[in-house]
Image (spheres, rainbow, N blue to C red):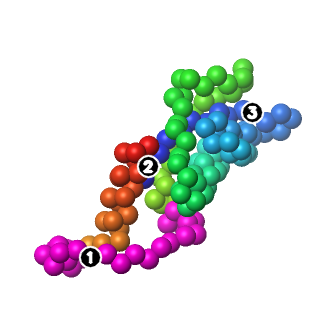
Amino acid sequence: MKLIYPAIFYPCEGKTGYTVIVPDLPGCVTEGESLAEAILMGTDAACGWLLDELEDDHPLPKASAASDLRPKEDGIVNLLALDMDAYAEKYGAKAVRKNITIPAFMNTFVERKHLSLSKITQDALAHLMLAEA
């Protein structure tokens, strides 16, 4: 699942670097020593925030349009591209084993193509979850 959330970057007072605030994710704040690092840190913080919500079965907040954000004078608005599948694969703590039943002809196809039924199911569910958001 790929998501985009806007973030606001503010230069840190009295030192180099940026503070990152993701307005749609309450309490999601981080810093980076450069703008590039701040973008990476913001992406990581937002993914972590959202993964917690997904694992607790909470609905994800709707992302604001970047044009609707009004940062203070020195703030920069930037979009964060979030790859939740990659983040969850690396950091996700919860996995649930499910046993499913499919028709034999579908199982033959899956085996012949060396497909992962688990991956197919996860991709389909992620698509449905995005459609609901």
Is disc 1 surrounded by few (<14), some (14 to 19) or many (20+) residues within 10 Å? few
Residue type at the position of mark 1: Thr
Which corner quadrant of the image does residue 61 belong to?
A: top right
Residue type at the position of mark 2: Lys
Q: Which residue is mark 3?
A: 11
70 within the magenta span: no
Is disc 3 surrounded by few (<14), some (14 to 19) or many (20+) residues within 10 Å? some
Residue drawn at x 62%, y 52% is: 49
Q: Looking at the image, do the residues carrying marks 3 and 1 touch, with CB atoms under 8 Å apart? A: no
Tell whether 40 sits left or right of 83: right
Classify mark 3: helix, strand or loop: strand
Q: CA distance from mark 3 to mark 1?
A: 54 Å
Return the residue nearer the eye: 14 or 26: 26
Specify whether residue 26 is in view.
yes
Sequence order check, earlier mark of 1 and 2 = 2
Residue type at the position of mark 3: Pro
Residue drawn at x 56%, y 35% is: 6
Q: Position of residue 72 (x, y in %)?
A: 72, 23
Sequence order check, earlier mark of 3 and 1 = 3
Return the residue nearer the eye: 37 or 54: 54
Q: Quadrant of the C terminus?
A: top left
Sequence order check, earlier mark of 2 and 3 = 2
The stretch in magenta equals 88-114
Q: Which residue is mark 2?
A: 2
Say which mark, if any, is on residue 16.
none
Say which mark, if any, is on residue 101.
1
